[in-house]
């Protein structure tokens, strides 16, 4: 019974987890079920060190495919057709290509018609963790004893059309096996199947980052910065040139995969898309992406936020150039406001709460699919959520522990300055005659909770603001604040929510 449970557990684990912790197999029966299709010794004590990914075209019953195993501190490979093969280590270069070594001798297995076949044996150069297989045909990157890199095929022969050797190579393993290569003092980029994707003609080249759109959609290409004669441009591993190398400075933001901040030599900063469409004119003294703290910004980050500098002041802009926060010269206040902006943004709140990229709770599947295809239906759907979102947003920001803070009194204008601790960006002034000022200050703490219960709020510039509030003293005097900005207030419109892409 115990072995049956263990075997069932291992089958489930192998089906859903590719790099789980080591699994100790209790005996030959369990191991045979773990790696169906192998003939292995009957001794107990095998350990599965690493399981490979599921192999396309292989029947579910033979789900293991290939694994690295260990017995008595010695490594082996177990495959559909070979096993166990003694080795020091093994690597999966692609879904159909596995490499293993014994000392400085390297061999390769290719997947052909659902079976693993050895295509390279005892090769005397180090095979790097980059390569691609198409049937029995493989391309692998190797490094010789002098440190030079080159491409070989499944028989160990140099691949025609590629340089005899590269002076250097950098493998971006986690990014679709993009390889930066250097030959003749110049850099370019190649794919894992030895295709040139960025011409080898640049003085410097490096990967920007994995770029995503808001909502988790990957960009269509990995983008690489390239430098030629001291000037910067952007190339993609799909062969596209997003920006030619004519710029003195570049920056990007991972959630806007095709949008670039740029500065021409001796000029100002601007922003454009890879298509060449202008987002911001070339009139800024500085443009820099801002990375929000994940605790503050929540599960989903802003689609695009950038700090723009003009003279001594800075502002926070969205992906369309709209000011999310106005220009400020006080660095400390600006840094605080930017840091907490996502938590105080109605747009971000609505996006996080309603998960607009997914089907809504009260939305049919048909309506969901329709609005994904029709921008006007998407706009209507978002508009329908705004009233409930506003109420929820006010409740989330104010909560049950909001506090009123009374500040200075201006005897000339007979006004007190006060604020609400949950509304960081605003202070307010309320008229209190000098004859009542002393008692108002004395009673302020005791009358604050009733005042907060009467308060009305509205959304201004994507953030919560106080609309009105009334203070009633024990003597029965009432002092009321009404925000002039709230006059004629209507619910936020789609224009106000253009933070959402």
Image (spheres, rainbow, N blue to C red):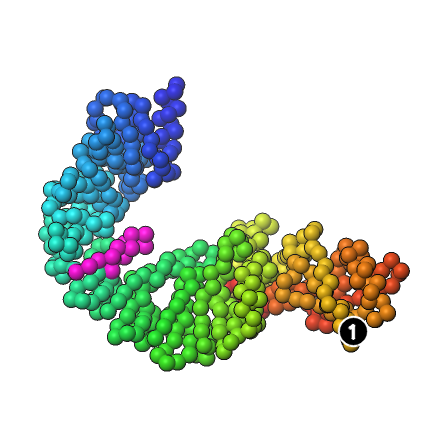
Q: Residue 109: where, in percent of width, then height?
A: 18, 42
Res 77 quadrant in image: top left
Q: Is residue 404 above or below residue 101?
A: below
| Along the viewing direction, whichever of 131 and 127 lies nearer the viewer | 127
Q: Is residue 285 left or right of residue 449?
A: left
Q: Residues within 10 Å of mark 1 (few under 14, many from 20)?
A: few
Q: Is residue 262 above or below residue 141?
A: below
Q: Mark yes or no: residue 378 visible.
A: no
Q: Quadrant of the N terminus?
A: top left
Query: Is residue 52 rendered magenta in the image?
Result: no
Q: Is residue 472 left or right of residue 269?
A: right
Q: Residue 460: where, in percent of width, then height?
A: 64, 67
Res 37 quadrant in image: top left
Q: Identify which residue is drawn at 12% across, 54% down.
A: 146
| Along the viewing direction, whichever of 97 and 365 lies nearer the viewer | 97
Q: Which residue is mark 1?
A: 411
Badge 1 element: loop
Q: Is residue 313 above or below residue 450?
A: below
Q: Mark yes or no: residue 400 visible.
A: yes
| Along the viewing direction, whichever of 65 and 85 lies nearer the viewer | 85
Q: Identify which residue is drawn at 17% across, 46% down.
A: 136
Q: Residue 360: where, in percent of width, then height?
A: 56, 52
Q: Identify which residue is drawn at 37% across, 81% down.
A: 266
What residue span does the magenta drawing correspond to? 167-180
Res 60 quadrant in image: top left
Q: Is residue 288 left or right of residue 298?
A: left
Q: Identify which residue is drawn at 35% across, 35% down.
A: 21
Query: Is residue 172 rendered magenta in the image?
Result: yes
Q: Residue 74: where, in percent of width, then height?
A: 21, 31
The residue at the far right in this view is 475
């Amino acid at each position: 019974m115990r072995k049956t449970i263990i075997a069932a557990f291992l089958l489930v684990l192998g089906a859903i987890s590719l790099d789980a912790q080591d699994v100790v197999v209790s005996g030959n029966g369990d191991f045979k079920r773990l790696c169906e299709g192998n003939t292995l010794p009957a001794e107990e004590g095998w350990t599965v060190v690493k399981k490979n990914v599921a192999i396309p075209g292989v029947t579910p019953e033979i789900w293991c495919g290939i694994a690295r195993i260990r017995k008595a501190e010695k490594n082996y490979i177990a495959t559909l057709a070979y096993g166990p093969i003694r080795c020091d280590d093994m690597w999966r270069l692609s879904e159909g290509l596995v490499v293993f070594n014994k000392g400085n001798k390297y061999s390769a297995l290719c997947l052909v018609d659902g079976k693993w076949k050895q295509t390279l044996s005892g090769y005397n150069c180090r095979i790097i963790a980059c390569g691609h297989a198409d049937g029995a045909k493989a391309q692998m990157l190797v490094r010789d004893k002098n440190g030079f890199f080159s491409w070989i095929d499944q028989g160990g022969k140099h691949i025609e059309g590629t340089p005899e050797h590269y002076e250097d190579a950098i493998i971006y393993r986690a990014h679709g096996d993009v390889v930066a290569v250097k030959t003749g003092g110049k850099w370019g980029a190649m794919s894992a199947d030895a295709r040139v994707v960025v011409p080898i003609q640049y003085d410097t080249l490096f990967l920007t980052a994995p770029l995503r759109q808001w909502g988790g959609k990957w960009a269509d290409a990995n983008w690489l910065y390239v430098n030629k004669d001291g000037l910067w441009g952007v190339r993609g591993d799909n062969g596209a040139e997003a920006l030619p190398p004519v710029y003195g400075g570049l920056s990007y933001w991972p959630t806007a995969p095709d949008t670039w901040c740029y500065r021409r030599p001796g000029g100002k900063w601007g922003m454009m898309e890879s298509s060449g469409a202008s987002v911001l004119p070339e009139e800024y003294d500085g443009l820099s992406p801002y990375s929000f703290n994940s605790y503050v910004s929540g599960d989903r980050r802003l689609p695009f936020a950038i700090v723009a500098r003009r003279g001594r002041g800075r502002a926070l802009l969205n992906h369309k150039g709209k000011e999310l926060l106005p220009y400020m010269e006080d660095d400390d206040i600006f840094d605080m406001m930017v840091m907490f902006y996502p938590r105080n943004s109605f747009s971000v709140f609505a996006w996080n709460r309603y998960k607009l990229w997914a089907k809504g709770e009260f939305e049919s599947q048909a309506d969901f699919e329709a609005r994904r295809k029709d921008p006007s239906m998407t706009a209507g759907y978002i508009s329908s959520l705004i009233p409930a979102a506003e109420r929820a947003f006010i409740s989330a920001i104010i909560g049950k522990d909001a506090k009123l803070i009374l500040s200075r009194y201006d005897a000339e204008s007979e006004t007190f300055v006060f604020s609400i601790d949950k509304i960081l960006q605003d202070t307010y002034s309320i008229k209190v005659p000098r004859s009542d000022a002393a008692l108002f200050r004395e009673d302020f703490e005791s009358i604050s909770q009733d005042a907060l219960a009467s308060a009305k709020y509205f959304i201004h510039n994507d953030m919560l603001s106080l609309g009105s509030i009334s203070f009633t003293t024990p003597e029965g005097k009432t002092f009321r604040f009404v925000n002039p900005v709230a006059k004629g207030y209507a619910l936020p419109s789609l224009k106000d929510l253009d933070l959402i892409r």
